[in-house]
Amino acid sequence: MTFQCDAAQAWQWLEGGLAIMVDVRAVEERVESGVPSTAQAIHWSSLDAELPVLLSQNKKILLLCSVGQESLVYCQSLDASQQKNIFSVAGGFEAWFLADLPISACQVSEHMLRYDRQMRLLGVGRAGQEMLSNSRVLIVGVGGLGVPVLQYLAASGVGEITLVD
């Protein structure tokens, strides 16, 4: 079974409205090098949950990673009913860039960039990070245990922290 298409074929499918491109690279990579103009950014950790929604659009799904290896392994691991519509872009973003296909700058918020790794964790995701950002915590006592708790809560993105000593 064919799991790959080259960058030129992917571009033809995208231009013809026959496909959806999903950029599965980390935020840091997308910010550093840009993203294909028509790509949706969905990290690996969220892809399994998003896949049914993508497949329901009855288009080919083109997965784009850095060099094409991770996306190829992912495509090979899918069951037969999904494999016919999901393709790895051979050579990944590197091949897309070398083929001189359209790339746009990746605009992400400071919040997204700061908490990207945390949002990749199963059970956290964007929704979990949003809940953390909107949460309020009261710490009573800023002694031996209060200080490390404060540091971890602040680093995790808790929205409002109140200290009482």
Image (cartoon, rainbow, N blue to C red):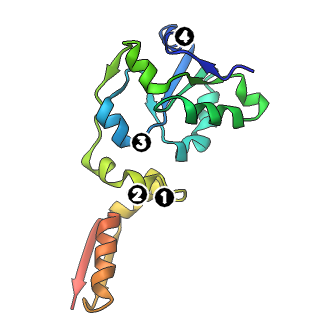
Q: Residue at x 52, y 12 (%)?
A: 17
**Which residue is under mark 1?**
124
Amino acid marked by disc 3: Ala
Amino acid marked by disc 2: Gln
Spatial CA span between label 3 and label 1: 16 Å
Say which mark, if any, is on residue 9. Answer: 4
Kindly check if marks 4 and 2 are in contact, taking CB atoms under 8 A apart as contact. Answer: no
Kindly check if marks 3 and 1 are in contact, taking CB atoms under 8 A apart as contact. Answer: no
Q: Quarter of the image containing the C terminus? A: bottom left
In the image, residue 126 above or below residue 155: above
Amino acid marked by disc 4: Gln
Do we see residue 33 in this rendering? yes
Q: Secondary structure at mark 4?
A: helix
Spatial CA span between label 4 and label 1: 36 Å
Of pointers 4 and 2, the one earlier in the residue sequence:
4
Do we see residue 158 in this rendering? no
Q: Residue at x 28, y 35 (%)?
A: 107
Amino acid marked by disc 1: Val
Badge nearest the viewer, 4 or 2? 4
**Which residue is under mark 2?**
129
The 10 Å Cα crowd at callout 4, few under 14, some 14 to 19, many 20 or more, is few
**Which residue is under mark 3?**
26
Spatial CA span between label 2 and label 3: 17 Å
The 10 Å Cα crowd at callout 1, few under 14, some 14 to 19, many 20 or more, is some
| Quadrant of res 33 | top left
Kindly check if marks 2 and 1 are in contact, taking CB atoms under 8 A apart as contact. Answer: yes
Of pointers 3 and 4, the one earlier in the residue sequence:
4
Q: Is residue 97 left or right of residue 58?
A: left
